[in-house]
């Protein structure tokens, strides 16, 4: 499909990508969503916590929401999306990736940008225990990459999955990793690294036979983290092997589910390859929208409903 012309016009003071990103991540608040937690025991004995919220009226529609790096089901971008869908007769389940729900997971592995196996289990569980006719997928950043990879890597996509939306998605992980290591992103880089390393210290206590204190002390950058932990814990040779095999960009041509990607042009996390114009033009199921503004998951709009939330709802309604 041709690239979609965006209509996003943020308030003047949120045209700056840094300001919109930081405000949305640290200061936005969303109220009025009551979540009910369900613990899903995975096939390998680990667990994932699912936080459900529901439409006021009985519905056959569900949106599955996936968060980004070091996020969780209570992040404002997750709650905001759930609230808008709930208010429009769609149930929502906000997924906490392994180890992200406030409790350290049981296995040495956790989550990463290409971990579609957990998403497959979640979808299978929902289809076996619920009765939804229409299921939508929406992911943010890392979660968006997981969804795009899942849709294009050759999985059998269940019939109820009608649409997907990926927001601020680093679909070319090597390029995005390089951007995060530049000076302009040093504050984001250091914040991510600090949180990841702190969580890894808990893993080290659990799994001292495979992860040493010296290993953790050697981590100076996010790339180091992926070399020391992400790659080794999830079956990759090193960070670059992880980036290469987990990037969704290579799978976009195979997507057969209607899918909307919204990546802001002033998102400092994204490299030029993360704007898949060629792939969108060659695939009638792939819709790409590239607003000038929005930063990274910072599409501030009106009445605390974000532009990406409004567009996601419009997109799934257009398919009815």
Image (tube, rainbow, N blue to C red):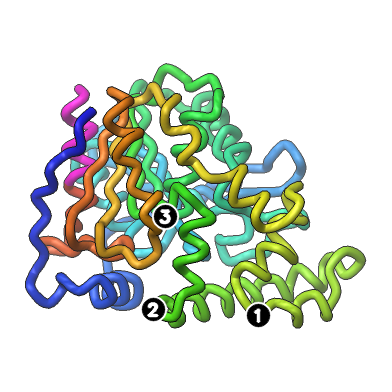
**Vertical arrangement, residue 79 with respect to residue 314, above or below:** below
Residue positioned 53% across, 19% down in the render: 156
Left/right of residue 88 with respect to residue 211 in the rendered view: left
- Element under disc 3: loop
Residue 151 vertical position relative to residue 289 in the rendered view, above or below: above
The residues bearing labels 2 and 1 have C-alpha atoms spaced at a distance of: 17 Å
Q: Which mark is residue 184?
A: 2
Q: Quadrant of residue 238?
A: bottom right
Task: Count residues near mark 1 (Cα–Cα under 10 Å), then give few for <14, some for 14-19, many for 20+.
Answer: few
Q: Does residue 167 lie above or below 118 as drawn?
A: below
Work out whether mark 3 precedes mark 1 in sequence or the reverse, and give the earlier one. Answer: 3
Left or right, residue 271 beside residue 27: right
Residue drawn at x 82%, y 67% as measured from the top left: 206
Separation of disc 3 and disc 1 at Cα?
Answer: 23 Å
Res. 245 in view: yes
Q: Which secondary structure lies at badge 2?
A: helix
The quarter holding residue 108 reads bottom right
Q: Residue 60: x percent and y percent?
A: 32, 26
Q: Position of residue 295 (x, y in %)?
A: 27, 65
Q: Secondary structure at mark 1?
A: loop
The location of residue 25, given as percent across then percent down, is 34, 71
Q: Residue at (51%, 34%) from the top-left corner?
A: 150
Mark toward the start of the polypeptide (2 vs 1): 2
Numbered marks: total: 3
Magenta highlight range: 311-320
Residues 58 and 91: in front is: 91
**Which residue is labeled 3 in the image?**
141
Q: Which residue is mark 1?
A: 220
Q: Main secondary structure of the magenta part?
A: helix
Q: Quadrant for the C terminus, please.
A: top left
Label 3 CA crowd tier, 10 Å (few <14, some 14–19, many 20+)? many
Q: Residues within 10 Å of mark 2 (few under 14, many from 20)?
A: few
């Amino acid at each position: 499909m041709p690239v979609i012309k965006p209509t996003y016009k943020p308030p003047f003071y949120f045209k700056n990508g840094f300001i919109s990103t930081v405000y949305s991540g640290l200061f936005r608040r969303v109220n009025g969503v009551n979540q009910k937690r369900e613990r899903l025991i995975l096939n390998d004995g680990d667990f994932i916590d699912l936080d459900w919220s529901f439409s006021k009226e009985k519905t056959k529609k569900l949106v599955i929401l996936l968060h980004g790096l070091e996020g969780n089901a209570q992040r404002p971008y997750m709650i905001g999306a759930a609230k808008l869908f709930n208010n429009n007769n769609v149930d929502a389940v906000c997924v906490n990736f392994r180890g992200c729900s406030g409790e350290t997971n049981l296995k040495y592995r956790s989550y990463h940008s290409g971990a579609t196996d957990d998403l497959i289990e979640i979808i299978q569980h929902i289809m076996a225990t619920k009765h939804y006719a229409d299921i939508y997928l929406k992911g943010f950043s890392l979660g968006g990459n997981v969804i795009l990879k899942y849709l294009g890597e050759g999985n059998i996509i269940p019939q109820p999955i009608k649409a997907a939306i990926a927001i601020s998605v680093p679909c070319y992980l090597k390029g995005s990793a390089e951007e995060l290591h530049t000076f302009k992103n040093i504050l984001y880089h250091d914040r991510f690294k600090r949180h990841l390393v702190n969580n890894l210290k808990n893993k080290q206590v659990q799994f001292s036979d495979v992860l040493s204190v010296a290993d953790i002390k050697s981590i100076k950058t996010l790339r180091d983290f992926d070399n020391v932990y992400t790659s080794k814990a999830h079956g990759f040779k090193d960070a670059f092997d992880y980036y290469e095999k987990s990037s969704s960009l290579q799978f976009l041509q195979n997507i057969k589910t209607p899918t909307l990607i919204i990546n802001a042009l002033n998102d400092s996390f994204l490299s030029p390859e993360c704007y898949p114009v060629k792939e969108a033009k060659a695939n009638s199921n792939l819709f790409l929208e590239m607003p000038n503004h929005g930063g990274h998951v910072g599409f501030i709009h009106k009445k605390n409903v974000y532009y990406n939330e409004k567009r996601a709802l419009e997109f799934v309604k257009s398919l009815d």
